[in-house]
Amino acid sequence: MLIRRSPDIRSSEITDESLYWRRRDWLASLGFGAAAVVMPRLAHAVSRQEETNTWDEVTGYNNFYEFGTGKDDPRKYAGTLRPYPWTVSVEGEVARPGRYDLAKLFGGLSWEERVYRFRCVEAWSMVVPWNGYPLREVIKRLEPTSNAKFVEFTTLYDPEQMPGQRRSILPWPYIEGLRMDEAMHPLTLLVTGVFGKVLPNQNGAPVRLIVPWKYGFKGIKSIVRIRFVEDQPVNTWKASASHEYGFYANVNPDVDHPRWSQATERRLGKLRRQPTLPFNGYADQVADLYRGMDLRVNY
Amino acid sequence: MDTPIRWRISIAGWISESTTEPVTQAQWIRRVVKPLLWAAGLTPLGWLLYAAIHDNLTADPVKAITHFTGRTILVILFLTLSITPLRRLTGFSWLARVRRLVGLFAFFYAVLHLVIYLAFDRGFVFTELGEDILKRPYITVGFTAWLILLTLAVTSPIAMVKRLGGKRWQALHRLVYVAPVLGVIHFAWAQKKDIRLPLIYAAILGGIFVWRLGSIRRKRAPG
């Protein structure tokens, strides 16, 4: 088994707010009032050990090849993207297909803040306070059929708005996918904001995916299509270099990129590298999804 | 002093020890060329310090410095390789006498490049460096280039030419052609996807090789 648990990994280092509130409600409902008071404080104390990155780092250091391959290109050039109005096409094995504007997609759901680690496959990382909606809540209202085994997401294709698409550095449009159980996991988020503000264009406005236990490239940006499918989608980076990037792309310090190590990462804002955690520190919440799978093969 | 240069005369009074005697080539190199080369060679370092002070090194400064010093090494090696054909083109014989200094600046930035990687990426854990060299081809190639530059730097003093013997020294220093080739491969291999810039470097290096070949051929051709 590749999933290593070391005693110094505290998955609660970064608080998953909704989970802890839910936990708190649950405890309160059982009458453990005292525990409910103590737990958030504890959780808060440990969450302080990893500091949130700055607005400048989160919005000025991005991989969004639709606007260029430089890390500062998206901030410089994403002004051409027009994220409002925006519609998302819901297709495939689903009872309620159609074109949804964001109000219809998220209406009635509560906008949450989730502070997550973000680990890029290039071995740098950040801590980001995202705002958005659990993907599971959105999926529930779309009512996928029993044939839906995977969810496929597609980014806007429009070289006018996304000039980087004029070069075929990647096969456009960008596509990503999740297995249904990954998509339904409470940590998986459709993000529409960051730092309590509307998501800037360079971060994937108006709506992007965040799967905190996976490498950053799974977090597809500026989503225009959500398709429920029976077969595993072919995600763009895998299509581009399948020996280097897989479908699962779970953060795993034991499985190196063919050209570089994934054992450590550089947290932006820190000079020295730090160890990378299995499943980016969320192992106790997601490792069960991959029980019995060889993560060396399914990288 | 095979090429008299008009504008050299005009500043002769400034660089010459006496105003009555003509400027010798040694004076010219010592008073003008070398100070200018030192200033040029330290300019990338100055730029790095300036950028660091103004927090202008992106959100990942270690990566920015590593990449910048890497590109600087290649540019300086390209200049080193251009000196001989440039000398033939211009007839400035003094160019041959500053080639070593230019080459040593390439080594200086190579040391910076490796030290930054060792310090920030490997925390001075040398076993990890060994592992990287063995396991990661782009590091194997880069480190090989680094060892070549080290060898050339160590054997660059005149005394070493005498100790090794001119022929052997020259054969050893032909490795200066290999180092930038390995450097460009290392550069391209480290990219995630976009290798446009390494390809531009490769094209420039190819151009320099062709230029050198052409200039050697012309020299050997009769008449």
Image: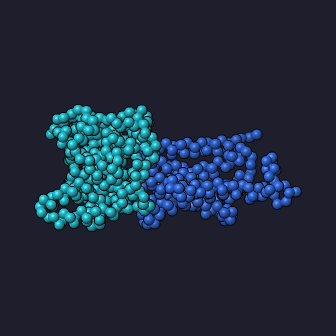
Furthest toward the right, the residue is B20
Residue A126's x, y, as percent?
37, 55
Query: Is any part of residue B106 visible from this angle?
Result: no
Residue A232's x, y, as percent?
25, 41
Compared across the picture, whether B40 is left or right of A121 comes to: right
Residue B43's x, y, as percent?
61, 55
Q: Residue at x 45, y 47 (%)?
A: A72
| Shade of chain A as shown in the rendered figure | cyan
In this figure, what is the number of numbered marks? 0
Furthest toward the left, the residue is A30
Comparing B197 with B92, the one in front is B197
Q: Residue at x 27, y 38 (%)?
A: A102
Query: In the image, is residue A91 above or below residue B161?
Result: above
What colour scheme governs how the chains and residues are painted in the rendered image of this protein? by chain
Q: Residue at x 64, y 54 (%)?
A: B40
Comparing A64 with A121, the one in front is A64
Residue A138's x, y, as percent?
22, 42
Query: In the image, is residue A212 above or below residue A8?
Result: above
Q: Residue at x 74, y 55 (%)?
A: B32
Splitting the image into 4 quarters, where does residue A203 fall?
top left
Compared across the picture, whether B10 is left or right of A23 comes to: right
Query: Is any part of residue B16 visible from this angle?
Result: yes
Chain with blue colouring: B
Q: Quadrant of the N terminus of chain A?
A: bottom left
Compared across the picture, whether B106 is left or right of B67 comes to: right
